[in-house]
Amino acid sequence: MTPERARQLAHRVPEPGLHEVSPGSAKRREIRFTRLPPEQAQRALELLSGLEYLKVSAGPHARGITVHYDLIDYTCEGLEKALRKLGYHLDNSLYCKIVRTLVYFTEETQLRNLKEPARLIKQSNQVYIKAYQHHPHGDRDDTPAELREDR
């Protein structure tokens, strides 16, 4: 990612009608629900489909939905917290807990990196070139040519 793009993402203000998804921040996640109460997935699909910049579809799992979003707009953790507050019960199997924890961590890290301004430091090879030029080495001989000749 270029420093200019990082700055744009960190300080962007969404304009109506102009919404671009940056590469790498487009996410597709599955949210699974428990068996009881029934029809949670269908109600959640209808509820979330009304949100802007969020695409929701039926998931591959019978009790799940698939959400597509940009990381700048939504996070999986935020969506799941909102669903819990509204009374939905998410699947708490060991597999789902592990996947959920991994997704939360990776999205949090990626979001923090997107918001962090790029460090504008010299390229490392330039630093070594300068140090090499100032360091005495065998390529230079300050002895005058007259004294170097064998007579």
Image: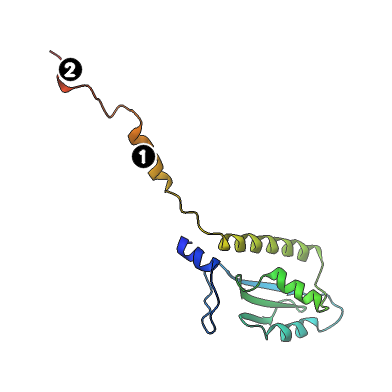
Residue 33 visible (yes or no) = no
Furthest residue in direction top, as rendered: 151
Residue shown at 66% from the left, 83% from the top: 51
Check disc 2 and report the residue beneath it.
147
Q: Nearer the viewer, residue 131 or 64?
A: 131
Check disc 1 and report the residue beneath it.
130
Residue 6, position as x, y percentages in the image? 51, 63
Q: Tell me where residue 96 sits by quadrant.
A: bottom right
Residue 135 in the image: above or below residue 117: above
Q: Nearer the viewer, residue 30 or 128?
A: 128
Residue 7 visible (yes or no) = yes
Residue shown at 72% from the left, 63% from the top: 99
Q: Tell me where residue 45 sits by quadrant.
A: bottom right
Furthest residue in direction left, as rendered: 151
Residue shown at 54% from the left, 74% from the top: 21
Tell me the crowding category of disc 1: few under 14, some 14 to 19, or many 20 or more residues within 10 angstroms, Cα based. Answer: few
Furthest residue in direction right, as rendered: 36
Element assignment for label 2:
helix
Element assignment for label 1:
helix
In whole angstroms, how far apart are the C-alphas of marks 2 and 1?
30 Å
Residue 83 in the image: above or below residue 117: below
Q: Amino acid at mark 1?
A: Lys
